[in-house]
Image (cartoon, rainbow, N blue to C red):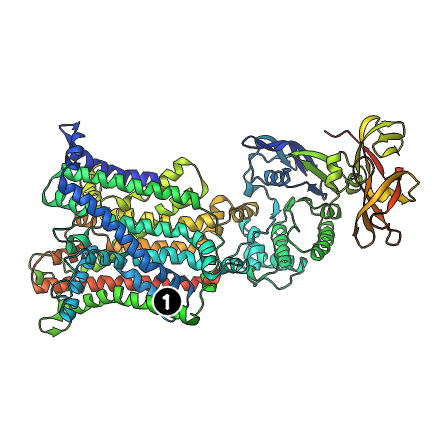
């Protein structure tokens, strides 16, 4: 417990507090009056209103579209399921900038739909909402579907025998068991969309701006630190409020569930209804996920001299882009993988310790910590990154030149995923199994290793996958702290997109495609491990 | 072997275990019997170290265990619902305790096989735990608990979830097995039949205290209180005033054994000691519900005054429902208990 607390105090609370302090202090005196001033500005109020509204709409739309997907992935068996599960997760790990660009290429001026039917959505809020669904589809499918697959179907059968119709059985038995997972997924989607940055930046244009975009604008463009600090606090308070509500609902619904092997719950589709549902979900995935990704790949190959690998070849040399890079962009791949691996390890250790501590203890303090772990997801990554730069630069913690700085920032967003994924499963492990191990001579540590770990191995791997993925795609904080000669993939993509010219645009698309492939391959490997080990369950 | 001294456990305001003293000798099988909520499971958990004591001490072979964590006590505990590790096969479950004690692999496998033979599941080592029936899980749980040769084996409702015939067979098997291995056993159950069949000594608990301890025969013949009597299924209890060998009750005068305590008491007549004869003899009763029990029939009797009676009748001489009969009591089957609290 002490390790995670120290980690968050040092690498999260301290940098954020330092930034806020800089914005709100003048000559060493706190200027709280600035909060009122900023919050009464009509343009800021508009930003607040839009941020909330689009987050609610995005969350509702994502749940509506993704819950059938969660069912299909949990309960139906069909060829190519593993591949598809990895595919729908790819968007989640793409840098927001790339997603924005992919949707621009799909829905914008001169985009795919514009060319086909003259349809343009880039000036409407629909582009933002669709991009958010694209992004968060996997969150719902994985969080809800993961639990759904492990629910014992016999519970529903018991309800059927007791006279409940198919729908009533689902509503009375399965739904209540799923509610915590649905709530957790909805919360995550709401958090991501509430703090959405890259997507809104590109697709929203000047008309639509979220808090995070505004913070970035005030910090990096207008250098108005006080306004940025106030907005950071507002976002912090909003996220804290959401998390408090969430903690409350979770506490009321937490139950020890009877979990079974997912392999035993999935069946090939039977009947017209299930086949239609499967077809609908596949079509959704095709249109929502594969189409934008396909357009991305298409653009990366679409050189002026016809389709070819020209953009990819250009990535191998540093001088093809003039002064944009000190190293060939292709080096970013290795950097990203190394950083993400280190970040995943950090996140697993910190998150694992926190989850284990949270499983064993109860009480107000621990529940507070539970909610606190989610804060990094909601706090402006821009603020964290900038905070790292101004706080971790003096002894004894002079990390500014150390490579560990980037993985540390990335692990910060990974830890909540690890905790969120592992906690429900850890809590569902019958504590008497641990007691049985203890009586047989296993020390608490050993009991954890021999009982908890094997039972939650699946969850650990899923957690590792998420942590790895978000580390790979992390942009907001990394862009501030990655050194120019060691860029990560998302940073390199953003730099290329920031420059004009067909070659830069094409290279950005090519690099995004590579990032997408790296993610897809990593996730496929993970799915493979999952099934190899499932024989032990 | 095991000595518990004034063990006390409180859950908030409720005292689950109230200054309990208990000793278990080497090779002895002791059964703690009591209704749910009597504290019997808490006692077991306290001995195992799973439940910290608020007061009192636990000794094993004279060594104070109170501060020792669970995994260092070297006990065996068979859980009520077995708690087999679902991610390990049968063999790995049985070998788990040996592994934590650092027994080398070959030795582990040998001993696991040996124990599976012992519990009647030879060659089941590679089977998945989920594929076992209730009785088989029971046996695996037993083998797992016995494998590290625990100083004391504890059983929590060992046969609770099994069907009746299997339970009766297993009780005999367990008793034979423990006798052969010389295992010291502390078991907990709410089923008196199970306790009497298994135990050398029975401890009846009520509200966190010991209500009576003794051999099964002693407890059966001389329940220490009306609580114990009722818990054992004896309902023929009535308020009484004893003078010499006669008790004045609502059922009339009842003869009691010599040397019974005098004054205000309760009198218990076991159903076998309720004799039914013609309506002119003894206490007049109306015959109520009759229940066929196999070797005998239990008959409910409603006397004109006082609580209802239960009698055991032979199959042939059971009176008709609604008939009026006379009832006398056999002093041999009559026990004087302390007054109801």
Farthest bottom residue? A306
Q: How busy is the neighbourhood of tag 1: few (under 14 within 10 Å), some, or many (20 plus)?
A: some
Q: At x 17% / y 41%, what residue is drawn?
A: A45
- Say which quadrant the N terminus of chain A sits in: top left
Q: Nearer the viewer, residue A346 or B197?
A: B197
Q: Is residue B184 left or right of residue A81?
A: right
**Which is nearer the eye, B88 or A374?**
A374
Find residue A283 and report its image quarter.
bottom left
Q: Where residue A378 appears, x then y in whole percent?
A: 27, 45
| Secondary element type, mark 1 | helix
User: What x and y, as percent, mark residue A531?
Assistant: 41, 64
Where residue A239 appears, x then y in whole percent?
A: 28, 42
Q: Residue at x 32, y 58 (%)?
A: A64
- Counting every numbered tag in the picture gives 1
Q: Left or right: where does residue B217 sit relative to residue A529?
A: right
User: Which residue is painted at 42% across and 43% down in the image?
Assistant: A251
Is the residue A26 above or below the residue B167 in the image?
above
Q: Nearer the viewer, residue A261 or A489?
A: A261
Q: Is residue B267 left or right of residue B108?
A: right
User: What residue appears at the point 91 percent right and 38 percent down from the top-left corner?
Assistant: B282
Q: Nearer the viewer, residue B16 or A415?
A: B16
User: Does any portion of residue A509 appear in the rendered image?
Assistant: no
Examine the rendering and report whether any part of residue B295 can be seen: yes
Left or right side of A32 for B52 = right
Chain of the residue displaying label 1: A
Q: Position of residue B208 (x, y in %)?
A: 64, 34
Task: Name the residue tied to disc 1.
Answer: A277
């Amino acid at each position: 417990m002490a390790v995670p607390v120290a980690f968050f105090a040092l690498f999260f609370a301290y940098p954020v507090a330092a930034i806020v302090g800089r914005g709100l202090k003048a000559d060493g005196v706190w200027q709280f009056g600035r909060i009122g001033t900023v919050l009464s500005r009509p343009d800021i109020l508009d930003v607040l209103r839009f941020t909330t509204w689009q987050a609610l709409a995005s969350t509702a739309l994502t749940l509506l579209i993704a819950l059938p997907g969660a069912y299909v992935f949990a309960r139906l068996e069909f060829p190519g399921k593993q591949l598809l599960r990895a595919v729908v997760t790819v968007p989640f790990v793409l840098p927001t900038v790339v997603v924005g660009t992919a949707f621009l290429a799909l829905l914008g001026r001169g985009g795919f739909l514009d060319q086909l039917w003259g349809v343009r959505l880039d000036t409407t809020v629909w582009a933002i909402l669709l991009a958010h669904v694209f992004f968060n589809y996997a969150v719902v499918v994985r969080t809800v579907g993961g639990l759904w697959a492990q629910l014992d179907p016999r519970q529903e059968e018991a309800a059927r025998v007791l006279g409940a119709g198919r729908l009533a059985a689902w509503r009375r038995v399965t739904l209540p068991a799923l509610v915590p997972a649905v709530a957790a997924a909805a919360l995550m989607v709401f958090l991501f969309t509430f703090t959405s940055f890259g997507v809104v930046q590109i697709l929203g244009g000047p008309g639509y701006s979220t808090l995070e975009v505004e913070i970035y604008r005030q910090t990096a463009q207008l250098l108005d630190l006080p306004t940025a600090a106030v907005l950071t606090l507002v976002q912090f308070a909003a996220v804290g409020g959401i998390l408090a509500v969430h903690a409350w609902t979770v506490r009321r619904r937490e139950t020890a569930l009877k979990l079974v092997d997912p392999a035993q719950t999935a069946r090939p589709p039977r009947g017209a209804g299930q086949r239609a549902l499967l077809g609908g979900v596949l079509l959704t995935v095709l249109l929502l996920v594969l189409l934008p990704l396909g357009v991305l790949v298409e653009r990366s190959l679409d050189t002026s001299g016809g389709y070819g690998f020209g953009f990819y070849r250009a990535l191998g040399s540093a001088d093809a882009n003039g002064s944009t890079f000190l190293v060939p962009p292709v080096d970013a791949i290795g950097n990203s993988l190394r950083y993400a691996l280190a970040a995943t390890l950090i996140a697993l250790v910190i998150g694992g310790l926190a989850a284990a501590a949270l499983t064993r203890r109860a009480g107000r303090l621990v529940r507070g910590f539970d909610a606190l772990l989610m804060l990094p997801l909601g706090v402006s990554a821009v603020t964290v990154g900038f905070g790292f730069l101004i706080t971790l630069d003096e002894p004894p913690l002079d990390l500014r030149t150390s490579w560990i700085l980037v993985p540390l920032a990335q692990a910060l967003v990974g830890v909540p995923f690890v905790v969120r994924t592992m906690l429900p499963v850890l809590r569902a492990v019958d504590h008497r199994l641990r007691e049985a191990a203890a009586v047989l001579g296993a020390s608490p540590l050993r009991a954890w290793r021999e009982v908890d770990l094997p039972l939650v191995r699946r969850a650990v791997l899923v957690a590792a996958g998420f942590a790895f993925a978000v580390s790979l795609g992390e942009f907001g904080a990394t862009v501030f702290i990655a050194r120019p000669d060691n860029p990560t993939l998302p940073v390199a993509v953003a730099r290329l997109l920031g420059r004009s010219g067909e070659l830069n645009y094409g290279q950005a698309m090519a690099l995004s495609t590579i990032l997408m492939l790296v993610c897809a391959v990593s996730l496929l490997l993970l799915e493979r491990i999952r099934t190899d080990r499932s024989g032990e369950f | 072997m095991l000595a518990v001294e004034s063990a006390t456990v409180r859950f908030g305001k409720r005292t689950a275990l109230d200054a309990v003293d208990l000793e278990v000798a080497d090779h002895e099988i002791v059964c703690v019997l009591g209704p749910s909520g009597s504290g019997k499971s808490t006692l077991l958990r306290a001995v195992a170290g799973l439940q910290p004591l608020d007061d009192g001490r636990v000794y094993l072979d004279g060594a104070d265990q109170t501060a020792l964590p669970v995994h260092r006590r070297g006990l065996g505990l068979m859980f009520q619902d077995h708690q087999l590790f679902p991610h390990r096969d049968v063999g790995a479950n049985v070998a788990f305790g040996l592994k934590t004690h650092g027994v080398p692999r070959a030795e582990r496998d040998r001993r696991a096989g040996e124990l599976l033979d012992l519990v009647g599941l030879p060659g089941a080592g590679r089977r998945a735990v989920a594929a076992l029936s209730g009785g088989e899980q029971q046996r695996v749980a037993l083998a797992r608990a016995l494998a590290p040769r625990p100083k004391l084996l504890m059983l929590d409702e060992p046969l609770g979830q099994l069907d009746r015939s299997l339970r009766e067979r297993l009780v005999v098997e367990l008793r034979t097995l423990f006798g052969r291995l010389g295992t010291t056993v502390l078991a907990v159950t709410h089923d008196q039949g199970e306790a009497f069949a298994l135990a050398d000594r029975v401890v009846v608990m009520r509200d966190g205290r010991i209500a009576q301890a003794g051999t099964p025969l002693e407890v059966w013949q001389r329940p220490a209180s009306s609580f114990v009597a009722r818990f054992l299924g004896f309902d023929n209890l009535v308020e009484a005033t004893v003078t010499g060998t006669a008790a004045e009750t609502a059922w009339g005068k009842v003869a009691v054994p010599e040397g019974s305590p005098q004054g205000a008491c309760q009198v218990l007549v076991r159903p076998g000691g309720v004799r039914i004869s013609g309506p002119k003899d003894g206490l007049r009763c109306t015959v109520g519900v009759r229940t066929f029990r196999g070797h005998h029939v239990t008959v409910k009797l409603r006397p004109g005054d006082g609580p209802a009676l239960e009698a055991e009748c032979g199959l042939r001489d059971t009176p008709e429902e609604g008939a009026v009969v006379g009832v006398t009591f056999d002093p041999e089957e009559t026990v004087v208990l302390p007054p109801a609290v």
